[in-house]
Amino acid sequence: MLNIALPKGRLGERVYAMFEAAGYECPAIRENNRKLIFENREKGLRYFWVKPSDVSIYVERGAADMGVAGKDILLEYEPDVYELLDLGLGRCRMAVAAPRGFYDDGSRILRVATKFTNIASGYYGGIGRDIDIIRLNGSIEIAPILGLSDVIVDIVETGTTLRENDLEVMTEILPVSARLIANKAAFKFKDGRMEAIVEGLKEQLAH
Ligand code: PRP
């Protein structure tokens, strides 16, 4: 069995549709139920839904042979996995945002609220700016409004969340999209099956 971890949610459904179109279908997955694991025994495939930020943990530790994770997660947690392909789905950007009109004059330590502490530290370290990181788990946009932080580092997709909370992008740090990843040992020993999947998905991308 080849074990494939998919990110639960809308992105995962689009990713599965790509696998299906490439000939790696598992019809049971489309039945509307609360199951999390689905098998196509004939094709030797087993898919499972996991929290998007957990996919790389399953893959790094070999509980999944392959999976799909956002570039943001890969840069934040730096799992020891192979990144095989940019699937071009789930495109968004990692950005610094602040209340409209905020200006960082550099006179004091900048307070940065984020889920992505590693990415934020790397970015500000790179430009030599001292910061105080405030680690939050969600609804990051609230932090500067309530004075918990000066700025945030977060994912921006449509920009609606920022706009509706009177924030704006100050700097774009990096583009983000979904990546196909693989467990390193499995990639070497699974007889070219994973390479075949990569090729099949590449063909889908070319369509
Ligand atoms: C993400 C991100 C932003 C929002 C950006 O939040 O943290 O809040 O999406 O999307 P937009 O630019 O299209 O408005 P998510 O829904 O993952 O929730 P959380 O970070 O608050 O947990």
Image (cartoon, rainbow, N blue to C red):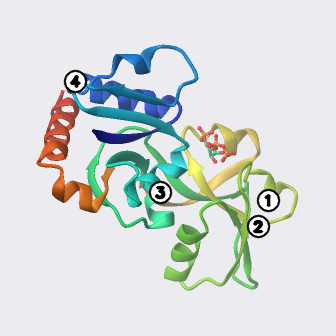
Position of 67 with respect to 45 (left or right) is right
User: Regarding mark 4 in the picture, which secondary structure is present there?
Assistant: loop
Position of 139 with respect to 128 (left or right) is right
Position of 124 with respect to 79 (left or right) is right
Residue 149: percent from the left, percent from the top?
Answer: 79, 66
Q: Nearer the viewer, mark 4 or mark 1?
A: 4
Residue ID for mark 1? 144
Q: Disc 4 vs disc 3: Cβ atoms closer than 8 Å? A: no
Which badge, 2 or 1, comes first in the chain's sequence? 1
The amino acid pointed to by label 2 is Asp
Residue 102: percent from the left, percent from the top?
Answer: 73, 63
Position of 103 with respect to 129 (left or right) is right
Which badge, 4 or 2, comes first in the chain's sequence? 4
Residue 107, picture quadrant: bottom right
Q: Nearer the viewer, mark 1 or mark 3?
A: 3
Q: Which mark is residue 57?
A: 3
Q: Disc 4 vs disc 2: Cβ atoms closer than 8 Å? A: no
Distance of label 3 from label 2 (alpha carbons): 32 Å
Residue 36: percent from the left, percent from the top?
Answer: 51, 31
Distance of label 4 from label 1 (alpha carbons): 53 Å
The amino acid pointed to by label 4 is Glu
Residue ID for mark 4? 42
Q: Residue at x 76, y 67 (%)?
A: 150
Q: Mark 2 packing: few (<14 Cα in 10 Å), some, or many (20+)?
A: many
